[in-house]
Amino acid sequence: MPPSSGRRVALVTLGCGRNEVDSDELAGRLAADGWDLVADAADADVAVVNTCGFVEAAKKDSIDTVLAISDLKVEGGTQAVVAVGCLAERYGRQLAESLPEADAVLGFDDYQDISARLQSVLAGEPHVPHVPQDRRRLLPVTPVERAAQVDAAAAAPAVTRVRTTGGPVASLKLASGCDRRCSFCAIPTFRGSFVSRRPADVLAEARWLAQDGVRELVLVSENSTSYGKDLGDLRLLETLLPELVAVDGVSRVRVSYLQPAEMRPGLLEVIASTPGVAPYFDLSFQHSSAAVLRRMRRFGDTERFLELVDRIRAAAPDAGIRSNVIVGFPGETEDDLAELESFLTGARLDAVGVFGYSDEDGTEAVGLDGHHDEDMVRERVERVTRLADELVAQRAEDRHSETLAVLVEAVGPGDVAEGRAAHQAPEVDGATTVSGLDALPKRPAVGDVVLAKVVGSDGADLLAEALG
C-alpha cells in the first residue's frame, strides 16, 4: 500500500448489489494510489456518489443525494462532489448540464483512471463529460465471439477490492451486462452486453471476502441464469456453486437475479439441495398475464410460473421465493391485472416488490399504445401492494414452528440478535429476530449461525427462539 497522499475520499453507494461491488473496486483503486478512505462525506475532500439509474424513484434519490452532499461544500467541508454509476453513465453530458452541483460526471470508462480523475477535479481542472452510447455495441454480438475479450480481461491486472461496507454479508459479482431485450428496461444500453467472469476469478474473490470475515456471499449480476453462456458452458453455475460453498469460512451462498424462462432443472436442483447454498429463488416474473409479458418481450404465463413454483417447493418445501412485478404497463387491462393477482395468490411468495410502470428513455415501451395515466398506475400499485403485503404476511405465518439457520448480523444489548434465515436476502426480504440467547452455551457473535424456532411474525419479519 503506497503512503497516504493526504487526500480523503468517501464513496456513497446507491442502488443494487452490483453497485456495491463497483464501489468496492473504485475504493481499491483509490486506496492503491494512496487515497484515504473515509466513511462520512463530510470528512472527505471529495465525495463520490455511485448513482442508480434504473427507475424514476432511483434517479431522484441519486440526484437528491448529490444535492445534499453538495451543500457540504458551502459549509466548508467536502471540496468536490463527483457522480459515477449507472445514472452518470446513462446520461453523461446531459446530467452534467442539468446538475451543475456535481463537480464532475464520470462514466464507466473513467473507472480505470479514477484516481487521476479525482485529482484533476480537486485541482479545479474542467472535466468534459462523456456522450452516452449504446454499450452493447462495444462487444461482439454473439457470446462465443466474446470469449477472446473475456480472456483478455482475465489476463489484465486484477482489481484490488476494498470493502466499503462491513458485516458478514457481501455481494460477489458473477457477470455484468445483459443480452435480454425487455421492452421496459434500459439497463443493457448502459451496462452493455452480458459478460461472465471466469470461475477462477470469482473463487479467488470469494476466498478474499471470506478472509475478510464474510460468511454469506450474494452472487449478483443482471441475469445469473445466463452465467457461463459466453464461456461455452451454460451449466457453469451448477458446478461453481459447490466450489463456492467449499471456500473456508463461507457459511452460505445465495444466488440473485434469476430469469424464470431460463431456469434449468439442473440449476433448480443444485440451488434447492446443495448444503450451504441458500434454497432461495429470486425470480424476475414482472407479470403473469401472457399478453402483458409479450408486450414486455418476455416469456411465460400464470400456469407456467405456478408450475415452476411447484417444482421449487417439491424440491425444497421451505425454499424462499421472491419476485418483482410491474403494474400499469401500457395495454394492461383489468383482466390482466386480475390474472396477476390470481398468480400472486396461488404462488404465495415470501416477498414481492410492486412497481408502477413509468417510461424509461430509449426503451421500446415508450412507443407502445395503451399508456395509463399516473393516477391509474398509482391506484393499481396500491391495490396490488395491499394484496402482496397480505400474502407475504400469510406466508411468514406458514413458517411458524419452522427451525431456521439464522446468520447473525447484529447482537443486541439484551438476549436478542438480528439476522436472516436462508429465505431472507439482505435488505429486501425481511429479517429474523432471535431471542433466548442467554440460554445458549455461548453467546453468538456477528457472523455466527444460530438455530432458532419461529414463534411469531410481523409482515415478512420473523420472531424466533434460539435452540440450545
Image (tube, grey):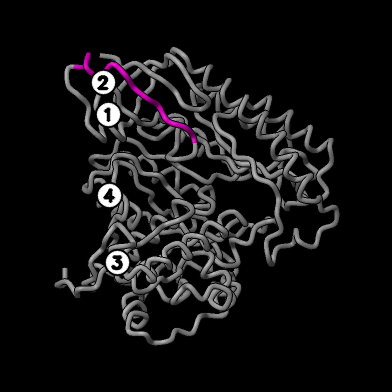
Contact between marks 1 and 2 (CB within 8 A): the answer is yes
Q: Is residue 261 left or right of residue 425?
A: right
Asked whether the viewer can see residue 108, the reply is yes
Callout 3 secondary element: loop
Nearer to us in this view, 157 or 385: 385
Closer to the camera: disc 2 or disc 3? 3
The part of the chain drawn in magenta is 429-440
Label 1 belongs to which residue? 412
Q: Residue furthest left?
A: 3
Residue 416, given in percent of the width and then of the height, sits at 29, 23
Label 3 belongs to which residue? 44
Residue type indicated by callout 3? Ala
Mark 4 and mark 2 lie on one chain; the one further toward the N terminus is 4
Query: Dividing the image into 4 quarters, which one contains the N terminus?
Result: bottom left
Name which quarter of the figure residue 426 lies in: top left
Q: Mark on residue 209? A: 4
Residue 441, given in percent of the width and then of the height, sits at 17, 17
Name which quarter of the figure residue 354 lies in: top right
Callout 2 secondary element: loop
Label 2 belongs to which residue? 415
Mark 2 and mark 3 lie on one chain; the one further toward the N terminus is 3
Q: 10 Å neighbourhood of mark 1: few (<14), some, or many (≥20)?
A: few
CA separation in Å, label 1 and label 4: 25 Å
Residue 401, given in percent of the width and then of the height, sits at 44, 12
Callout 1 secondary element: loop
